[in-house]
Each structure stands twice: as structure tokens, then as C-alpha cells.
Amino acid sequence: MEIEKITAGQELFLDGQETLVGAWKKSLEQHPDKTLFSFNGEKMNRATFLDQTSQTASALVNYGLTQGDRVIISGETSLDLVIAHVACLRLGLILVPVNSSYSESELSFLIKDAAPSAALVDNQEWHELISSIDPDVFISSTSLKIESGPIPDLDFSKPEDPALIAYTSGTTGKPKGAVHTQRTLLAGALSVANAWEWTESDCLLLCLPLFHIHGMGIGLHGTLLVGGSAVLQEGFDQDSIFSAITENGCSMFFGVPTMYNRLLEDERVTQLSSLRLCVSGSAPLSADLHQQLKERGGVDVLERYGTTETMLTISNPFSGERRAGSVGLPLPGVEIKIEQDSGEVLVRGESVFREYWSKHKESDSSFDNGWFKTGDMAIIGDDGYISINGRIKELIITGGLNVYPQEVDEVLQLHPEIVEAAVSGVESQEWGEEVVAWVVMEEGVKSLDLDEIRKFASKYLASYKLPKRLVFVKELPRNALGKVLRHELKEEGGANGK
Ligand code: AMP
């Protein structure tokens, strides 16, 4: 029988009083003229950035927002989005970043759950929807066009004050808000900065979305913490990636495996070797892709592992072997335990979230004696390297984005010609996994059109959650209790390998 294994990263030195915003201020007040962000050819230095966040905070105070109020924030990457994000944190507001590709019903759920006092969203169509749910919510785009007044008191939050609610579906269908504090956010960014020797001379090429912990909690927050700089890009575009590498002198790139797959197909892939660090995460990087990037691109990608709730917890070393097929060793400030029988990865440490927003029962059950249960499975080698080798939770990761099958099943079942449906992730070279739906049709219905089903489901779901294929079956495989056996789906109807 496997014995339970516990392994820990180096100690993370956090002064008890330190907060994310306090640490940012300290680093950004030095060298005011140094460029902090570049976006679409526009450059912004540290002094201007700090000043604009103060002005925006003043506008938010004018509107009547006070510490602890929740603020929905959503938009494509822009300087305004980043300024609003940081202004809220400096003012002690609790940020709720939202994926701008969400459908109206996904957004409605979050509004009801987080009960925000303000919504800074760039999608004008959402403004009406939000005010119809709660007319008292202050609504604006991320560029606040309201009068600002005197600069308010800023950066006063205490380490344990909630700072951000990151929505994730955890192990079930409905999204849950993982509450991070000033301290957990600081720890998450600091442990990575230490491990990857991230310094103020680094320039990060950041095209990851800023509503997710990967791009926001690590990419954006880390840049501000170390006082480095970042070239911000609105989404992944190969030409922009390669021109940023050659023209902006970037030194680091953070991506997901789907991005690396595309970069590998491009003859300019060798340009990646001019970066000092390329990181992959959010989904498994196959050993084969890792190897090909090394051979054809001359780049030894560093793979790391984490979750929204814990931030990053395991990483291949910056100096030392970056092992293909392994996520490496625990990061500073993190302890990892591999459960004896199930092989589940449990995490304890400085960057672990405090609770799920207003969900006490789920919060309690997601911990085992202080250890967060990730729902992922792993093995540890004799030399301490950890390899993720499965998932206990029902989760599909497609192009680095998470899809919770139950949520998609429920929507497909609303379709009048579908009796029941269940989705699962099928291996895909391009997406890692792709969403495939197994469907039982109503009697008399001979076939269903994929485009029509996608159009129907898009009223409720963001586009990356929509099925890429349909497999028609007579019935879904179920256990004695009626639960759909998703692992058996793939054997039905020959969806594998198509
Ligand atoms: P999220 O909460 O959106 O960051 O998603 C977290 C999930 O992504 C984890 O629970 C894992 O299932 C998966 N994940 C993240 N990084 C990796 C990785 N390097 N290898 C395999 N799975 C990963």
C-alpha cells in the first residue's frame, strides 16, 4: 500500500504586517520614471500608474464605495482595466474579476452570489442586465468617467482583509467564490517571484486573461510586486507574441499548453529561446510537447501547477532539472500531501484561500484538517518530483480554461429534442481536451445539428464551454445510484480518437 507522503517547499518570509498593496507601493515608489506597462504601443511609467490608481480610487470613494464592498470587474485587457483593478485593491474593496466571455445567465449568477456594490464592466450590454438585477449597483466601464475628488486614504488594508473573490466551480457545477486576502495574494505572488528569480529587470509578456489567477494573481500582481514591467496583450496572437519578443525585449512569457502548441507550429518558435523564462500551466503540458519545444524552439519550458484556491503550489525549479511530464517540487511557503489511498493532492500554505464566499458548508468540506483538497491526483518520485496523473473532480480543461461537465449537461438537457446529455473531455492535440457531448435524442428525432445545439447552448454558456462534437447514444451509462459514469462515456459511440 502507498504510504502518505508530505513534502514542503522552502520557508516563505512574510513579515506579519505585510499586505499585497503595501508591498506594491514600496516597490513602485522607487524609480518613478521606469516603464511599468506597455499596451498597444502606449507606455505607462510607475509614477503615472500610481497617480492614476489614486485618482480612480478617489472617484470610487466619491461614489460612496467603502472597504469591504464587492466590485465586479470585467473587460478585455487594457490599461484602464489594470488601473481600476489596482485602485480597488488599494482602497480595500473586494474585487470580483469576471470572464468577459460569460453569457448573461453566468453573469447573473455571479451578481446574485457576490452581491456587489459596483460593477466596472466594459460590455455595455451587461449594464442593463446588472441594473435589472440590482438597481443599486453603481455601474461604469473600467475607465471611470466620474469626477474624482481629494485622494483618499489608500493601502491601509490589513493582511487578513479579504481582497479578491476568484470564482471557480471547485468540484461541482455551480461557481464558488474563493476568497483571497491581502496576505494570501501577496504570498502567492512572492513565492513565485522568489522561485523564478523574478526581478525588476524582467519584462513579462502577458497575454493571459486578467480575470484568472494565472494571468492576474501571478502575471499582473507579480510584476507590480517585483517592480518589473509587462507588455500587456489582449489575448493570444502569434504575430503580436513574436513582435513583442523582438521589439520590446521581453524576458519572460507565461502561457498554457494550447498556446505552446501553436507557437511550436510557427517557424519563429526559436525566438522563444531569447527569453530567460517560459512557463506553462493551467493544464498538463505533455512530455512530447515539452521535448519538441526544446528541440525545435531551443526553450526548456518550466511547468508549474496550481489552482484558483491555492495559487501556484508546485513548480519545476528555475535552476535545476525542468522535467518533462512533471510539475516539479513544492514552492516556497507550501506543503503538499499526497493522500494515501486516493492519491489526491492536498495543499497547506501561505497562499491558500480562506473560504468560499458565503458557502460555509462547501468551505468546510473542501478542507481536511486544514489541508485543501485539490481534486487532482499525483505521485511523488523518490527524488521529490511530483507528477499530476489524474483528476478526482469532474473537470474538463480545454485550451487552459475550465469547464464543469454538469453545468453543460444541464444546459443541453433544456433543448427540446434532447432527453438527456452528458459531456466529457476527450484528448485533443490542439486543446488538450475538448468538450464532447453524449446525447440521447427524443423519440422520432433522427439527428441533431451541432451548430444548432451550440447556438442554443450559447444563450447560457460561454463559447469555450460549448461541445465541439456530438455523439448520439441510446442511453447514458449510469451506476446503481443513477449517477452518469463519465469515464465510460468515452468508450460509447466511438468518440475517442476521432
Ligand atoms: P484553475 O482553478 O482554473 O486554476 O484550475 C486548476 C486546475 O487546473 C487544477 O486543479 C488542475 O486540474 C489543472 N492544472 C493546473 N496546472 C496544471 C498542470 N501543470 N498540469 C495538470 N493540471 C493542471
Image: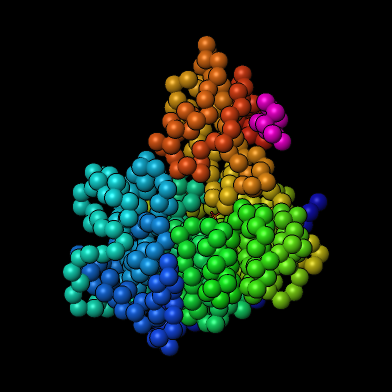
User: Looking at the image, is 455 positioned above or below residue 329?
Assistant: above
Residue at 55 percent of width and 60 percent of height:
239
Residue at 51 percent of width and 66 percent of height:
206
415 sits to left or right of 311? left
User: Looking at the image, is 45 positioned above or below residue 338?
Assistant: below
Is residue 32 at least partly visible in the picture? yes
Main SS class of the magenta portion in the image: loop
Residue at 35 percent of width and 52 percent of height:
114
Q: Residue 383 versus residue 87: which sits nearer the camera?
A: 87
Residue at 47 percent of width and 42 percent of height:
463
The image quadrant of residue 319 is bottom right
**Is residue 497 shown in magenta?**
yes
**Is residue 274 shown in magenta?**
no
Q: Residue 482 versus residue 330: which sits nearer the camera?
A: 330
x, y percentage for residue 442?
51, 16
Extent of the magenta region: 489-498
Q: Residue 181 versus residue 396: which sits nearer the camera?
A: 396
x, y percentage for residue 220?
47, 69
Indicate which quadrant contains ligand 1.
bottom right
Quarter of the image where the C terminus is located: top right
Is residue 89 at least partly visible in the picture? no
